[in-house]
Amino acid sequence: MRVLLTGATGFIGRRLYGRLVRREDIELTLLVRDKRKLSPIPPNVRVIEGDTFNIDALHKATSNIDVAYYLIHSMRAKNYDQLDKESAKNFLHSCISNRVEKIIYLGGLGEKDKSSLHLRSRIEVGEILSSREREIKTIWFRAGMIIGAGSASFEIVRHLTQKIPIMITPKWVRTKTQPISVNDVIDYLETAIWTNIEKNEVVDIGADLVSFEELIRLTAKIMGLRRLIIPVPLLSPRLSSYWLILFTPVPYSIAGELVEGLRYETTLKNSRAKELFPQINPTPIKDAIIKALDETIQSNIISRWCDSTTSLFCDISQKSMQLSESILTYETSKPLPSGLEEKVFKVIKSLGGDKGWYKFDFLWHIRGLIDKLFGGYGINRGRRDPDDLRVGDALDWWKVIDIIPNRRLLLYSQMKNPGEAWLEFLIEKNSLKLTAYFNPKGLLGILYWRLTQPFHYLVFNDLIKNIVREATNK
């Protein structure tokens, strides 16, 4: 079976890619914006770099394909609802032109006239992909909250449960939903390749009927914590979003959409999952939470909610690679004993997250809190794995944009500030060099850089000193 997978660097797509790439009965093609995010890629996988707005790349990707996955969403772009519709139309047209037999799409549960903009956009995409049934068939899966390590919704539940013993919550935390384990979602998507359909199918998938409040209580019980939840009618979605960003790694732009969606019930409206996929029994929510927590503890997070997006806020652009544009720099270096390069680089890759940033870690947290208040990620986004990094990974408010093993790590700042910033670790000629680059936006950007110079001296000199010390003592 010749299969095209889009969104292979995203939360669902990366996990599905891990399944499909191991199958000998599939010829797999990927359409990705940056193939480095998936390296190493097996030689039998065809990779097309581009997106659904690059018509030539899209046409090339959909050629000689039997089944095409559409796992794309533009949620973090300002006009994402319009981009979603344009993207879906491009994809549908290209699939029909190349005589693709079937599209498999994952959208969200909900009713179009009783849903948030985010959910309404997902429904509209499904309607577009299903609009030409005579020419191409579509299996449209609809899921609510996905329970899995790295999912945006589950990250909110986990962080709130861990950090807040007494929660004053909006009354809509009692709204009902039917979450589903991320592994079940992948099972449905994978099995759908070989599912014969005579017409378009809308397949609602989910497990137990619960509320957001019940999810928090169940998660707390599994974690051995006692939590008091007090729903009140005063917290609007906007206020709730500000409350969430202080305690979770999800930024305001995403938290706002998720909170808005929680006001509406997202429950199953059909039984097509049981009828078309009787071999799949949805995992009980308790078991799904246990598995997600185990993955988090064991650092086995395959993918995260911010692995791939279409906006600069959580992705890599060509502009972010152009360090030559940065006109302001701060540089410090420290000599390295011969043969210490590998150990030093291992320490560099472990920075941030729960480990922190050494002596002046509290300054990073203060700056992270300020960033949160302005709608950024702050520092509590953490990292996927405590020891390993790959291109595209989130690292607190940084994004990994280049790795050369035992030589270079380049991070791009996704912090809210008046300019663009990078942080580079470079090992060369028996020395470790740390360079901060800043491309200011006007006078405010230059003033910001000058005011932060004393902190650069304290933080970066301490950072590079402790990296070498830790590597020496290993």
Image: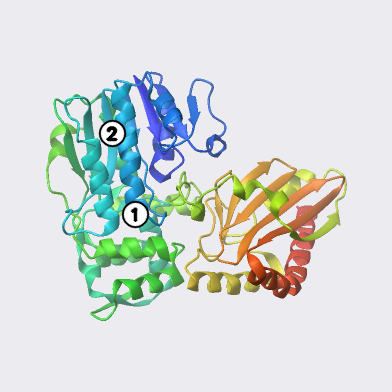
* Residue nearest the viewer, comparing 167 with 272: 272
Give left or right: position of 469 versus 309: right
Q: Given the image, on which type of amino acid does mark 1 rest?
A: Ile
Q: Quadrant of the N terminus?
A: top left
Q: The residue tagged with tag 1: helix, strand or loop?
A: helix
Mark 2 is surrounded, within 10 Å at the Cα level, by few (under 14), some (14 to 19) or many (20 or more) other residues, namely: many
Q: Real-space Cα distance between discs 1 and 2? A: 26 Å
The answer to whether residue 219 is seen in the rendering is: no
At 30% from the left and 44% from the top, the residue drawn is 85
Image quadrant where residue 214 sits: bottom left
Image quadrant where residue 196 sits: top left
Give left or right: position of 212 versus 359: left
Q: Position of residue 118 (x, y in %)?
A: 30, 55
Mark 1 is surrounded, within 10 Å at the Cα level, by few (under 14), some (14 to 19) or many (20 or more) other residues, namely: many
Q: The residue tagged with tag 2: helix, strand or loop?
A: strand
Q: Position of residue 20 (x, y in %)?
A: 40, 28
> For the residues carrying marks 1 and 2, which lies nearer the camera in this image?
2
In this picture, is 72 found above or below 374? above
At 50% from the left and 63% from the top, the residue drawn is 377
Badge 1 or badge 2: first in the primary sequence? 2
Give left or right: position of 20 versus 270: right
The residue that disc 2 covers is 104
* Residue nearest the viewer, comparing 153 with 138: 138
The disc at residue 289 is 1
Q: Position of residue 111 (x, y in %)?
A: 16, 54
The answer to whether residue 356 is seen in the rendering is: yes
At 20% from the left and 62% from the top, the residue drawn is 264
Image quadrant where residue 257 sits: bottom left
